[in-house]
């Protein structure tokens, strides 16, 4: 069990690092090419991540990750039916950050609908 938690944490941090790298690269390209109409949406899909979710969300906001690429960016988190306290932590964070959207499994289609409407 401890090994699985460790592996999950390592994968989560690796994913976070990859996102930071991609956003930094895209941000650099956009600043040099003035990409004002770039449509990028940051979505995290989580399940049973009570041990790491608060740190990841706070790092996204405190590190300015959303502002690197998106001038009016929002972070959307889809909770895929967590059975631990992930949902409660996300609701608390939602009160701290007004640009944070927390969706449940039944609401996940809203992400694609909103993005499609932004494209038009």
Image (tube, rainbow, N blue to C red):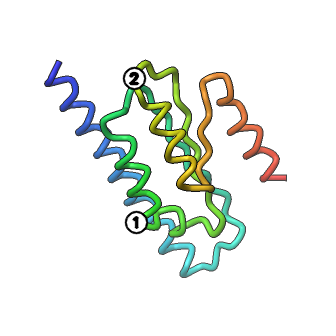
Q: Percent x, y for residue 70?
A: 60, 65
**Classed neighbour count for the residue bearing mark 2: other residues with Cα under 10 Å, few (<14), some (14–19), many (≥20):** few
Name the residue beneath numbered marker 1.
63
Q: Which mark is residue 5?
A: none
Direction right: furthest residue: 120
| Residue at the far left in the pictured view | 3
- Give the mark nearer the N terminus: 1 vs 2: 1
Residue drawn at 59 percent across, 50 percent down: 100
The answer to which of 22 and 81 lies nearer the viewer is 81
> Which secondary structure lies at badge 2?
loop
- Secondary structure, mark 1, is loop
Determine which quarter of the picture holds residue 112: top right
Going 40% across and 65% down the picture, which residue do you hit? 63
Q: Label 1 to label 2, Cα distance in Å?
A: 27 Å
Q: Closest to the observer: 71 or 100?
A: 100
Q: Is residue 87 left or right of residue 50?
A: right
- Disc 2 target residue: 84
Q: Residue 11's x, y, as percent?
A: 28, 37
Residue sitting at x 42%, y 64%: 62
- Is 42 in front, or is 74? 74
**Residue 111 screen position, x and y as percent:** 68, 39
Crowding at label 1, few (<14), some or many (≥20) Cα neighbours within 10 Å? few
* 11 sits to left or right of 112: left
């Amino acid at each position: 069990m401890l090994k699985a938690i460790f592996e999950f944490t390592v994968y989560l941090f690796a994913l976070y690092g990859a996102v930071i790298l991609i956003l930094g690269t895209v941000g650099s390209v956009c600043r040099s090419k003035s990409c004002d109409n770039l449509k990028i949406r940051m979505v995290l899909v989580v399940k049973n991540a009570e041990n790491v979710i608060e740190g990841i969300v706070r790092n996204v906001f405190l590190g300015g990750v959303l502002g690197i690429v998106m001038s009016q960016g929002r972070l959307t988190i889809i909770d895929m039916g967590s059975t631990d306290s992930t949902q409660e932590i996300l609701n608390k964070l939602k009160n701290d950050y007004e640009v944070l959207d927390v969706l449940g499994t039944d609401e996940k289609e809203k992400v694609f609908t909103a993005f499609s409407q932004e494209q038009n």
